[in-house]
Image: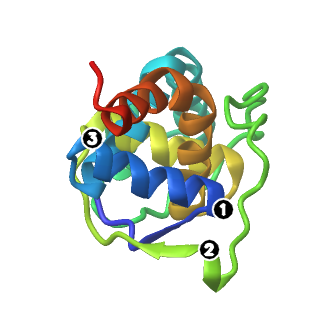
Amino acid sequence: MRVGYFYAMPEDYERYQIAFAACGWQSTYLINQFLSSFAGKNIDYYRTAFEKAATAMQVDPKELYKLCRAAEEPELPPYKTAQPNYGSSPLASVVGVQTGAEYRHRIGKFKCSGRNAVVLRIAAHIERESTPLTLSRVMSWHFANYWDKAYAAQIQNDYNLVL
């Protein structure tokens, strides 16, 4: 998947740098982790939203899936019927991310599963924003939900040289 950049507020970007350094992962693997946790936790919402979108666009779901998992950001078909009511998005609680140049960080290309790419693209469609901005919000969501549970303890143990 090609996403040339993401945006991050200073606290999230610092966490991003600390996490991939402390965990021994490549930075793009961490981005894949953001998507994987987000998609896994919210798959029911996005599966339903995907089905509603395909129906309203009058597109075969398999074709919409192929479009959404493409490497480049796709232009999704317009709605042929009324825009569906998607309900409250899992990203609704995420405070908007600033999009100034000082918050923009280059990533280029990373690998993720087809399902996670589709979830990201459908989320961007629902939020009416670009894939990079939606990815940025997924990062914020991930750290808000997993920083203390998944990263802070590991980093603290390593810092203190204890298991």
- The nearer-to-camera label among 1 and 3 is 3
Q: Residue at x 27, y 41 (%)?
A: 23
Please name which of the two marks, 2 or 3, marks the residue nearer to the observer. Answer: 3
Residue 144 % position (x, y)? 63, 34
Residue sitting at 20 percent across and 46 percent down? 24
Check disc 3 and report the residue beneath it.
23
Front-most of 79 and 65?
A: 65
Residue 159 location, x and y as percent?
36, 39
Asked if the residue under mark 1 is in contact with the one under mark 2, i.e. CB atoms within 8 Å, the reply is: yes
Q: Please tell me which of labels 1 and 3 falls first in the chain.
A: 1
In depth, the one of 103 and 135 nearer the eye is 103
Label 2, label 1: how many angstroms apart (C-alpha)?
6 Å
Q: Which kind of residue does numbered mark 1 sit on?
A: Met
User: Mark 2 or 1 closer to N-term?
Assistant: 1
Task: For marks 1 and 3, give the CA distance.
Answer: 21 Å
Residue at the disc numbered 1: 9
Mark 1 neighbour class, 10 Å CA radius: few under 14, some 14 to 19, many 20 or more? some
Nearest to N terminus: mark 2 or mark 3: 3
What residue appears at the point 63 percent right and 36 percent down from the top-left corner?
Answer: 56
